[in-house]
């Protein structure tokens, strides 16, 4: 109820406010798709950092805006599919992925 009143009040007074006091709308930033090699490098650096003991803050800092990058997420899904098709398991990569999934 209070939120609704607050929004109504803001909409009411916003047209008369000076420009520097008006709320700015956030524009959506269009993410540029990286090449597969660039995504693989980003992911490799991430795994290296996790194996060196990065915490969640360091992981988020490394990934930056790529954390919500739909192209990176699609690349990760495809990369996972390719890994499952390999005849021999890569135990080092598997252990790094387990560490990544369990970081605090």
Image (cartoon, helix red, strand yellow):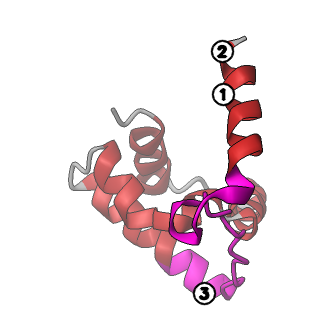
Q: Is residue 103 left or right of residue 77?
A: left
On residue 55, which mark appears? none
- Report the Cα–Cα distance between label 2 and label 3: 51 Å
Q: Residue at x 21, y 48 (%)?
A: 53
Residue sitting at 56 percent across and 76 percent down? 40
- Tell me how far mark 3 sits from mark 1, CA to CA: 49 Å
Q: Nearer the viewer, residue 85 or 47?
A: 47
Q: Residue at x 36, y 37 (%)?
A: 103
Q: Are marks 3 and 1 in contact (CB under 8 Å)?
A: no
Q: Which residue is mark 3?
A: 37
Position of 46 with respect to 84 (left or right) is left
Which residue is situated farthest in the front direction here?
A: 16
Say which quarter of the image contains residue 30: bottom right
Q: Residue at the spot x=71%, y=61% of the render?
A: 86
* Residue bounds of the magenta highlight: 14-41
Give coordinates of residue 82: x percent, y percent.
Answer: 75, 64
Q: Nearer the viewer, residue 24 or 66?
A: 24
Q: Which residue is mark 2?
A: 2
Query: Which residue is the site of mark 1?
Result: 6
**Magenta stretch contains residue 103:** no
Closest to the observer, 31 or 74:
31
């Amino acid at each position: 109820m209070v939120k609704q009143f607050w929004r109504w009040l803001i909409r009411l007074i916003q047209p008369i406010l000076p420009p520097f006091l008006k709320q700015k709308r956030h524009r959506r930033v269009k993410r540029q798709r990286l090449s597969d090699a660039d995504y693989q490098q980003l992911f490799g650096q991430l795994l290296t950092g996790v194996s060196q003991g990065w915490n969640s803050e360091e992981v988020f800092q490394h990934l930056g805006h790529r954390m919500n990058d739909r192209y990176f997420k699609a690349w990760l899904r495809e990369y996972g599919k390719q890994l499952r098709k390999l005849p021999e398991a890569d135990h080092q990569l598997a252990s790094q992925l387990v560490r990544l999934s369990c970081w605090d």
